[in-house]
Image (cartoon, rainbow, N blue to C red):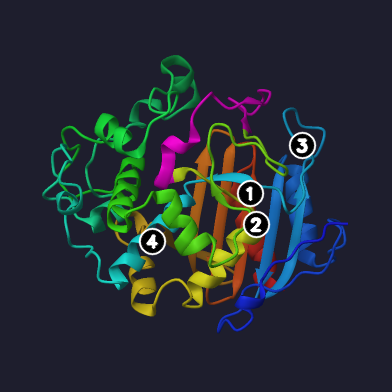
Amino acid sequence: MLCAYLGHEDLASLAVALVVVAPCIHAQTYAHPISATAREYAKAHNFSGTVFVARNGTVLDRESFGLANKPFTVQKSPDTRYRVASITKAFTAVLMLQLVQEGKLKLTDTVIAYLPDFTGEGGSAITLHDLLHHTSGLPNPDRGTRTYEEALEKGLPQYEAPQTPSSFVKRFCTGKLTHPVGSAFDYNNCDFIVLGEIISRITGTSYEQALKTRILSPLHMENSGLAHEATSFRGWQTPTFALGASEPLRSDFAMYPENMSAAGAMYSTVDDLNLFGAALFSGQLLNQKSLDEMMTPGLDNYGDGIWVQRYQIAGRKRRVFERYGTSMGANALMTIFPEDGITIILLSNTNETDLGEFRLAIARSAIQQ
């Protein structure tokens, strides 16, 4: 039996309840049609990971797939902890907006106002809003390694040796701008690593501690945090990846995940991410003005650390808030359909399954019920 809670006493009074306390369940006891959809898709597309689906506070599916038949893996359960990579950016955006609410910074302020030692071009022109929307024009440290083959050939110097956030910014996020500030969307981890440094300067503590103090501890997200190279504990799922559809799984490249800091160093579980989503949309983390700011799309339909999309499902376009996290074998997706009250969280330790298509298959099943 898999005994786990999906909520906490302190969350019982939320105005918008997206989480409920789950009974002690076995991974194969769900009889809802969504469970059948998830199982069929997981089997057909070689999914290895955990699925969570809820609608208006009712958990419709919460189970894991891919057990001992996978190399490098341990048996999974819904309590398994996965690296969630760039889902971290949504947490960083919330921390920034909390500081705005407290009057400690403004999104129209520039980088140099908070990092006077920033030596890159554009420090006096790039605003915090530009960083949140990936329109800064900062150099992109990942541009030369966009494929696994390139990473094998060239290595990953920005992640293969430990870096503090400050040293990462100095080594990889300074230099000439790649485009005029605010003129183009360019997805760039440097934007959020710089934001993490600003959060650290404003709060007087590390980004990791600010994350724990302001979000993880208040929400009782006890199975979430920043991954480190030495991270290893019960329920930890090591990421693995394949170079192609017919290639075997292999261990991720040697890297220090903490180098990703505010851009992508987090690990979590489906339950913890559901707590975060519930708190975000109930006003527990941000006021309505800040939430509206976060969910207002800019270039490439990107808001503050999150995409705002519309998908044609069941006869009409539906608004969707979503956040992917991918890094070699780390493969994660959190999606919320606000008008339908549906939350879908998919966490995997391989790159074998297209989580976007998996999410849409589940959403169609949920909406049409």
Name the residue carrying label 3: 74
- Residue positioned 74% across, 47% down in the render: 42
The span picked out in magenta is 240-263
Estimate how packed mark 2 is, as few (under 14), some (14 to 19) or many (20 or more) residues with alpha carbons within 10 Å. Answer: many
Q: Could you give the CA–CA distance between mark 3 and mark 2, rounded to whole angstroms?
A: 17 Å
Residue 188 horizontal/vertical position (percent): 33, 42
Asked if disc 4 and disc 2 are in contact, CB closer than 8 Å, the reply is no
Q: Amino acid at mark 4?
A: Leu
- Residue positioned 20% across, 37% down in the render: 178
Q: Amino acid at mark 2?
A: Val
Q: Could you give the CA–CA distance between mark 3 and mark 4, rounded to whole angstroms?
A: 33 Å
Question: Dot 2: what SS?
Answer: helix
Question: Dot 1: what SS?
Answer: strand
Quick one: 338 or 354, which is closer to the camera?
A: 338
Estimate how packed mark 3 is, as few (under 14), some (14 to 19) or many (20 or more) residues with alpha carbons within 10 Å. Answer: some
Q: Is residue 64 left or right of residue 337?
A: right
Asked whether 245 falls inside the magenta stretch, the response is yes
- Upstream in sequence: badge 4 or badge 2: 4
Asked if disc 3 and disc 2 are in contact, CB closer than 8 Å, the reply is no
Question: Which quadrant of the figure has residue 301?
Answer: bottom left
Q: Quadrant of the N terminus?
A: bottom right
Question: Dot 4: what SS?
Answer: helix
Asked if disc 2 and disc 1 are in contact, CB closer than 8 Å, the reply is yes
Q: Could you give the CA–CA distance between mark 4 and mark 2, rounded to whole angstroms?
A: 21 Å
Q: Quadrant of the C terminus?
A: bottom right
Q: Amino acid at mark 1?
A: Leu
Label ID, residue 270:
2
Question: Which quadrant of the figure has residue 150?
Answer: top left
Name the residue carrying label 1: 347
Name the residue carrying label 4: 95
